[in-house]
Amino acid sequence: MFNKRIVCRYCFKGNAIKKHGTAPSGYQRYLCGHCKRTFQGEYIYNAYKSPEELEKKKEYLNKERLSLLKSLSNIDKPGMVN
Ligand SMILES: [Zn+2]
């Protein structure tokens, strides 16, 4: 369902990425064929999550929490329900 997509952290293109050995830290390094720069895969993994995406997730979690609170308030004695 979720594919880790590698895109260049400098020019954000993903169709010319080549593996470029491994960094001392153990991360896979990549070379971008467009801007000829190298970067670590782990950085990209975090970078390509757009703010919009994170915002959507936050919204979704909030809605879920609200509906959970609503269903809890319908119970007369919540008791140990956490
Ligand atoms: Zn690039």
Image: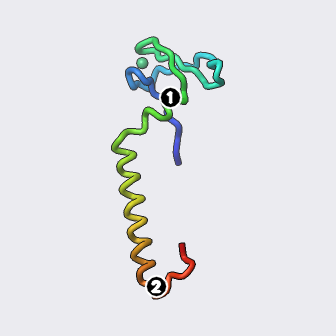
| Rendered residue at 46%/85% (across/down) | 75
Q: Where is residue 76 in the image (x, y as percent from the top left)?
A: 46, 88
Residue 47 figure quarter: top left
| Rendered residue at 65%/18% (across/down) | 24
| Rendered residue at 60%/24% (across/down) | 28
Kind of residue indicated by mark 1: Tyr
Q: Which circle marks residue 75 in the picture?
A: 2
Residue topped by disc 1: 43
Q: Where is residue 17 in the image (x, y as percent from the top left)?
A: 50, 21
Kind of residue indicated by mark 2: Ile
Q: Nearer the viewer, residue 45 or 34?
A: 45
Residue 69 figure quarter: bottom left
Helix, strand or loop under label 2: loop
Q: Residues within 10 Å of mark 2 (few under 14, many from 20)?
A: few
Q: How crowded is mark 1: few (under 14 residues within 10 Å), some or many (20 or more)?
A: some
Quadrant in which the C terminus is drawn: bottom right
Helix, strand or loop under label 1: helix
Residue at far top of view = 36
Say above or below: 13 vs 70: above
